[in-house]
Amino acid sequence: MSRRGCGSRCPAPAHSSAGGSRVLAGAGGGNVEFAQGGGRQRAEQNERGKRSLTKEELPPSGTSMFVGGAKVIVSINEYNHVVVFAVGRDGATVAESGRKVAAAVEAFTRAANALGGGENDVYVDYVAQSKVYRFELEKDVARETPSGFELKQNVSVRFRDRAMIDRLIDTAVGAEIHDLVKVDYVVKDLGRVHDRLMEEATGVIKRKKARHEALLELKLLPPAQVFAERSAAYYPTEMYDSYVAAEGEAMGMTPDRQRYAVQSARKGRTFYFNGLDADGFDRVIDPVLLEPVVQFTLYLKVKYEIDPHGAR
């Protein structure tokens, strides 16, 4: 399986891919995701680190007071997708490998456009051209010699409808393209997302200010001074975890242990999206996670001066 949740419909990965591909914003699924792990743990550590103030961020006087920082998170499920497929073909000559790649890309591009995507939504990226070697046996010497060339290209397709990914996978298989590199999640209006986070964080600060004034019987003087403003974004590629649902046993170190060769069974690994939850946040916007989402966070900490004559 090369994309989360695609099951048997996914093309089998032919080889690992590297090289340039156009990244618009964010990241999603694909074969590159198998290298990820512990995404949620890293995100939680990053969030805790944002809430630690440096020496320069501490209040400068005894008449200053911090209002507890506002920690806000929003989950965005409105985005475009960019799916990237890798195409590689061998040939005895550069021209032959080029013709094979061109034929595969042309077949896939034509079928992808027929699904509803326009020509401007498909981009072909020339990635690499390399020699291919093989071993030839000469008596007791295995000598590596050139045997041909391999040309690699990436094909990126942009789309909005989530259901398009399954049709694109079937289309790729029909063109004998079996390497789904990744699926990007592209959030277009980042400014609107950050504005909403700031509005929510400001509301949290105001409510905490009123609570502190009432509970501690003091008066905090405006204007507030911003001492920390830290934002972060977590894309689905970063937020997948995995586990193996199997139990095993260890081979004991018996005297004749070395007589046996151990052949381990293949145990399937399950991958799942494990986004941040409400823990540690003052305000959670859209808390229910039914699908992979892009999560944005904001930590805002402000300082007020205490009115020495305002105690009640």
Image (cartoon, helix red, strand yellow):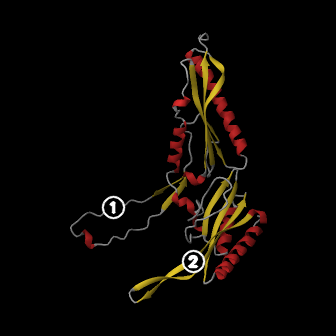
Q: In terms of sequence position, does the residue under pointer 2 or pointer 1 come before the other?
A: 2
Locate the N terminus by quadrant.
Answer: bottom right
- The x and y percentages for residue 303 are 60, 25
- Residue 294 in view, yes or no: yes
User: In the image shown, does 167 or 50 lie closer to the viewer?
Assistant: 50
Relative to 199, 55 lies left or right: left
Mark in front: 2 vs 1: 2
Secondary structure, mark 2, is: strand
Q: Up-down: is 162 above or below 40?
A: below
Q: Is residue 199 left or right of residue 119?
A: left
* Residue at 42% over, 60% down: 246
Side (left or right) of 250 relative to 101 = left
Q: How crowded is mark 2: few (under 14 residues within 10 Å), some or many (20 or more)?
A: some
Look at the picture and state if 22 lies above or below 193.
below
Residue topped by disc 1: 249
Q: In the image, what residue occupies the spot 63% across and 43% down?
A: 296
| Quadrant (top left/top right/bottom left/bottom right) for the C terminus | top right
* Vertical order, 253 against 136 (above or below): above
Residue placed under numbered mark 2 in the picture: 131
Residue at the image point whose x is 50% and y is 47% from the top: 41
For residue 258, the mark is none
State the CA–CA distance, disc 2 to disc 1: 45 Å
